[in-house]
């Protein structure tokens, strides 16, 4: 019994010392499966480089602009968002794709009955004969436009679904984990998942911290690299229900791949580091 108390005392003393160095990490509110997975990946990364870190969620959901303000004000320690020239200049990004670039792997949602429009498409030039629907302020809208793809825009992204149902454009290009969940929520609309094309461009979500918080930056960056190298990062990511189910439904290995460049990405984007990015032709890690 005395030995157990000594161990407990030593553990608490160690944690107190570690917390004196690391303190609490204040993260965004987590209220979606995607955010929960990202939060788990963050905790995995920090478990590789810190001890006894206490994670505290911000009490309300904030826009990207408000999160940026709270990071600068020191009321939030880290948040996650798509790579963005303005964010990457204002804050300190950990340039390791949280979802290994899966955000840039797109599956089309189309009007039910329009499958034949896409059955013959194998090249970007052929895809340019059709029109995409995009949110006016979505981070990847400029990527499609820079590739020469016709785009119909809506100020409110939610309006795009009824616009597609009314055939005001031909397809919505959604991240690989999104189409089936989104269609379940809109079963009143006559829409379908296109079965043959995988549309890819370099795009990622990053963790962002304050430029003043270089310690947390190094802890997250080093921890992510360690977790990627030892396989625990891929194991958590690809065996999560959200990603595992999406990849099974998408059947990416059988799809025709159409790639475009991302001319908006920062020159420091680590596009050359292959193990940071998902390869749709590579085998997935075993459970």
Image (spheres, rainbow, N blue to C red):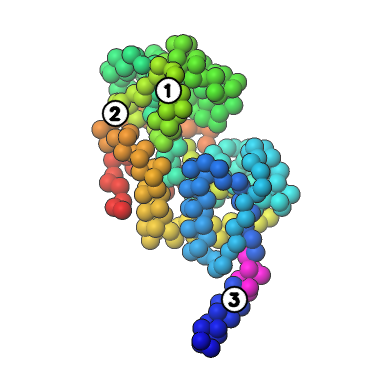
State the extent of the magenta-drawn residues as a range.
Answer: 16-22
* Residue 212 visible here: yes
> Secondary structure under badge 1?
loop
* Camera-side mark, 2 or 1: 1
Which disc is residue 60 wearing?
Answer: none
The structure residue drawn at horizontal position 66% and vertical position 47%, both measured from the top left corner, is: 59
The structure residue drawn at horizontal position 39% and vertical position 58%, both measured from the top left corner, is: 232
* Mark 2 touches mark 3? (CB < 8 Å): no
Report the residue marked by disc 1: 187
* Mark 2 touches mark 1? (CB < 8 Å): no
Q: Is residue 47 above or below residue 173?
A: below
Front-most of 256 and 64? Answer: 64
Q: Position of residue 215 (x, y in %)?
A: 62, 61
Which disc is residue 256 wearing?
Answer: 2
Front-most of 251 and 274? Answer: 251
* Gap between marks 2 and 1 measured at Cα: 27 Å
Q: Which of the marked residues, 2 or 1, is nearer the chain's N terminus? A: 1
Task: Judge whether residue 68 is colored magenta.
Answer: no
Q: Position of residue 246 (x, y in %)?
A: 37, 38
* Residue 205 visible here: no
Front-most of 215 and 172? Answer: 172
The structure residue drawn at horizontal position 40% and vertical position 16%, both measured from the top left corner, is: 190
Horizontal side, residue 180 vs residue 41: left or right: left
Q: Position of residue 261 (x, y in %)?
A: 44, 31
The structure residue drawn at horizontal position 55% and vertical position 43%, both measured from the top left corner, is: 31
Horizontal side, residue 214 vs residue 220: left or right: right
Report the residue marked by disc 3: 12
Q: Is residue 68 above or below residue 11?
A: above
* Gap between marks 1 and 3 measured at Cα: 52 Å
| Residue at the outermost front position | 1
| Residue at the outermost right position | 73
> Secondary structure under badge 3?
helix
């Amino acid at each position: 019994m005395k030995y157990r108390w000594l161990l407990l005392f030593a553990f608490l003393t160690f944690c107190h010392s570690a917390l004196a160095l690391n303190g609490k990490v204040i993260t965004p509110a987590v209220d979606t499966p995607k955010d929960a997975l990202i939060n788990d990946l963050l905790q995995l990364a920090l478990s590789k480089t810190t001890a006894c870190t206490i994670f505290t969620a911000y009490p309300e959901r904030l826009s990207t602009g408000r999160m940026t303000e709270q990071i600068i004000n020191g009321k939030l320690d880290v948040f996650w968002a798509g790579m963005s020239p303005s964010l990457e200049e204002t804050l300190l990004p950990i340039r390791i794709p949280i979802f290994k670039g899966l955000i840039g792997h797109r599956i089309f949602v189309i009007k039910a009955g329009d499958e034949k429009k896409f059955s013959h498409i194998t090249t970007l030039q052929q895809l340019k004969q059709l029109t995409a629907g995009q949110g006016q302020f979505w981070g990847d809208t400029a990527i499609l436009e820079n590739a020469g793809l016709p785009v119909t825009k809506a100020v409110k992204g939610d309006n795009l679904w009824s616009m597609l149902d009314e055939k005001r454009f031909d397809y919505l290009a959604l991240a690989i984990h999104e189409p089936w969940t989104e269609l379940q929520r809109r079963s009143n609309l006559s829409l379908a998942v296109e079965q043959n094309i995988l549309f890819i461009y370099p795009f990622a979500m990053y963790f962002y911290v304050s430029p003043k918080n270089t310690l947390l930056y190094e802890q997250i960056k080093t921890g992510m690299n360690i977790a990627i190298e030892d396989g625990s990062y891929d194991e958590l990511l690809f065996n999560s229900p959200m990603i595992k189910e999406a990849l099974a439904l998408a059947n990416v290995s059988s799809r025709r791949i159409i790639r475009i460049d991302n001319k908006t990405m920062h020159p420091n984007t680590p596009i050359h580091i292959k193990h940071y990015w998902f390869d749709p032709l590579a085998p997935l890690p075993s459970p």
